[in-house]
Amino acid sequence: MLWDTHMHTDFSGDSDASPKAMADQAQKLGLDGICVTDHLDYDYPKEPELFLLDLDRYVPSILNLKETYQGRLDIRLGIEIGVQPHLAEKHKQIVSSLPFDQVIASSHTAKGMDPYYPEYFYGSSQEDAYIRYFSSVMENISCFTDFDVYGHLDYVTRYGNSPVPAYTFDSCRKQIDEILKRLIRLEKALEINTGGFSSACRQVNPHPEILKRYYELGGRIVTFGSDAHAPKDIARQFAQAGEILRNCGFREYCSFQNRSPVFHKL
């Protein structure tokens, strides 16, 4: 079994790929299934309109795609929500009103700024910039829990001026432990996101040490996500990601259907 459960189409402001093109590539690669998870980021800094997902068009489009590929490729309806504390109630209403199979919560901003923009790091040490980000993650999962998977947990490490793992800093390790313990108590999945291989950090997100710590603390629910924004990136470096998970102790991963985990052997 091979599932890619994090990808974006032209319903997201940063992709030009049609849902059909993504499905065709997944079928060509021999995947068992995919979950389309286009962006919804309200109050996104600098470009507030960029990730305003047209849910009235998106949901029926992906459900129609699912019907079209029935028997050839299992397609599930997902969403990636850019979480921020003040949006918790709004997100809760959206998630509860639509038939998503999987909801990814991702921290794309901290204190109103996306680490993607260099100014996020201006005037801060690398450690302080990371601390600010992980503090925001903890705040988010304290305010909003109606999600299934936390996406690219150490996303901030993709964009540091001199990218270094968050585990370089003791203070970040302590924060990450608190986050992982809460995710485990909430029975939430942690994503291994191979999009990081194409970023400056040149590693999966989160770092293998974080995945290993999640396992040590009792976490067993993990998903594979390529974070593909184009067909060529679907399932990128999944073999390497699988080896990382096995080295951490995992023997299963999961996809989500109707908001519940379905486990598959690695």
Image: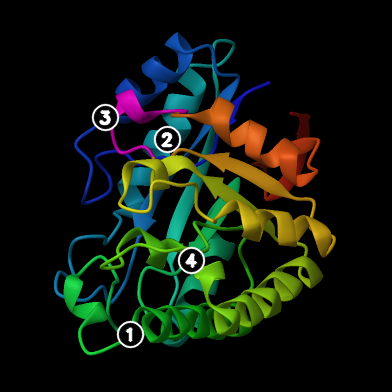
**Disc 2: which residue:** 62
Amino acid type of the residue tagged 4 in the rendering:
Ile
Amino acid type of the residue tagged 2 in the rendering:
Ile
**Disc 1: which residue:** 125
- Mark 3 and mark 1: Cα distance apart in space: 40 Å
Q: How busy is the neighbourhood of tag 4: few (under 14 within 10 Å), some, or many (20 plus)?
A: few
* Foreground label between 2 and 1: 1
* Foreground label between 4 and 1: 1
Question: Which dot marks residue 94?
Answer: 4
Residue 39: give x, y in percent of width and height: 35, 55
Element type at mark 3: loop
Element type at mark 4: helix
> Which numbered disc flags the more N-terminal residue, 4 or 3?
3
Amino acid type of the residue tagged 3 in the rendering:
Ser
- Mark 2 and mark 4: Cα distance apart in space: 17 Å
Residue 87: give x, y in percent of width and height: 43, 81
Q: Which segment is the magenta one?
A: 228-235
Q: Residue furthest left?
A: 46
**Disc 3: which residue:** 18
Confirm or deny contact between disc 3 and disc 2 (CB under 8 A).
no
